[in-house]
Image (cartoon, helix red, strand yellow):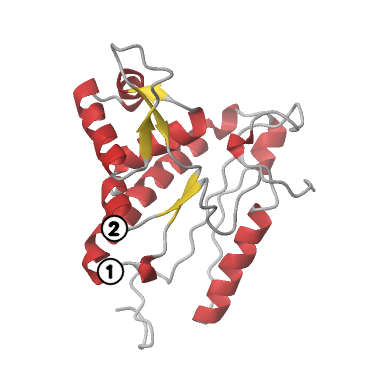
């Protein structure tokens, strides 16, 4: 079990390293392309519109537009130390995003749904790619990979407690942006996705499916 350190996933936002999405940053990030870009900059480090466009399969003009939108929401910043004057370099402004829909204005409901749909789309793409690439992994990594679903019958309190416990377990382990320092030589980037929700189509407090 890893020793506790500041290189692990936080359970609450760190004001110096994380962002709690507000109306402005939520609207700026509520697009699948921007979710992908933000993830690339957070995981892989600073990049340019040209390099990101090549990875995304987009033209540099469209990519620059999405970068400007993320910058307007305070989610990314220009990195002048890497810039050459010919092309701007961009870096993520935060380590991770925290999203608390209950604290947002009701007028942001549409943006909240758009953001969650964008996140869901990107996570689903990662799962599909991981499923395709699983047979190419060494056996020990194939066995460590999981695509699991656990239907449960819970109260809202139990569901909230369960999600909190799962996040606490993940928080014990090394964050991917911590770098190789202190990590075992055989450590690899490994992603945990946590999705927890009321069964789609179910009428809460009703007789069954809506």
Residue 186 vertical position relative to residue 7 in the rendered view, above or below: above
Residue 3 image offset from top left, x and y in percent: 79, 47
Image quarter of residue 54: top left
Quadrant location of the C terminus in the rendered image:
bottom left
Image quarter of residue 134: top right
Residue 8 vertical position relative to residue 33 in the rendered view, above or below: below
Image quarter of residue 36: top left
Circle count = 2
Residue drawn at point x = 45 percent, y = 40 percent: 126
Which residue is the site of mark 2? 23
As rendered, which of 175 and 202 lies closer to the eye? 175
Residue 124 image offset from top left, x and y in percent: 41, 46
Residue 154 appears in the rendering: no
Residue drawn at point x = 31 percent, y = 43 percent: 32
Which residue is the site of mark 1? 105
Q: CA distance from mark 2 to mark 1?
A: 8 Å
Asked which secondary structure carries label 1, the reply is loop
Residue drawn at point x = 30 percent, y = 12 percent: 85
Q: Is residue 162 left or right of residue 129?
A: right
Residue 173 image offset from top left, x and y in percent: 69, 47
Marks 1 and 2: in contact by CB < 8 Å?
yes
Asked which secondary structure carries label 2, the reply is helix
Q: Is residue 48 left or right of residue 152?
A: left
As rendered, which of 29 and 165 lies closer to the eye? 29
Residue 154 vertical position relative to residue 128 in the rendered view, above or below: below
């Amino acid at each position: 079990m890893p020793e506790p350190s500041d290189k692990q996933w936080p359970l609450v936002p760190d004001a110096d390293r994380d962002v709690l999405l507000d109306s402005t940053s939520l609207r700026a990030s509520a697009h699948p392309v921007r979710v992908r870009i933000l993830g690339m900059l957070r995981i892989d480090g600073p990049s340019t519109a040209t390099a990101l466009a090549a990875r995304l399969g987009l033209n540099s003009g469209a990519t620059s537009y999405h970068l400007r939108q993320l910058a307007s929401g305070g989610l990314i910043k220009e990195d002048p130390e890497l810039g050459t004057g010919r092309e701007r370099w961009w870096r993520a402004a935060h380590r991770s995003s925290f999203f608390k829909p209950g604290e947002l204005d009701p007028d942001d409901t549409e943006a909240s749904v758009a953001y969650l749909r964008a996140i869901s789309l990107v996570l689903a793409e990662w799962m599909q790619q991981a499923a395709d690439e699983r047979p190419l992994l060494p056996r020990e990594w194939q066995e460590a990979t999981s695509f699991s679903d656990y239907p449960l019958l819970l109260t809202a309190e139990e569901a909230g407690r369960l999600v909190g416990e799962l996040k606490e377990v993940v928080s014990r382990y090394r964050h991917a942006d911590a770098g190789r320092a202190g990590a075992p030589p055989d450590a690899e980037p490994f992603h945990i996705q946590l999705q927890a929700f009321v069964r789609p189509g179910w009428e809460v407090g009703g007789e069954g499916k809506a």
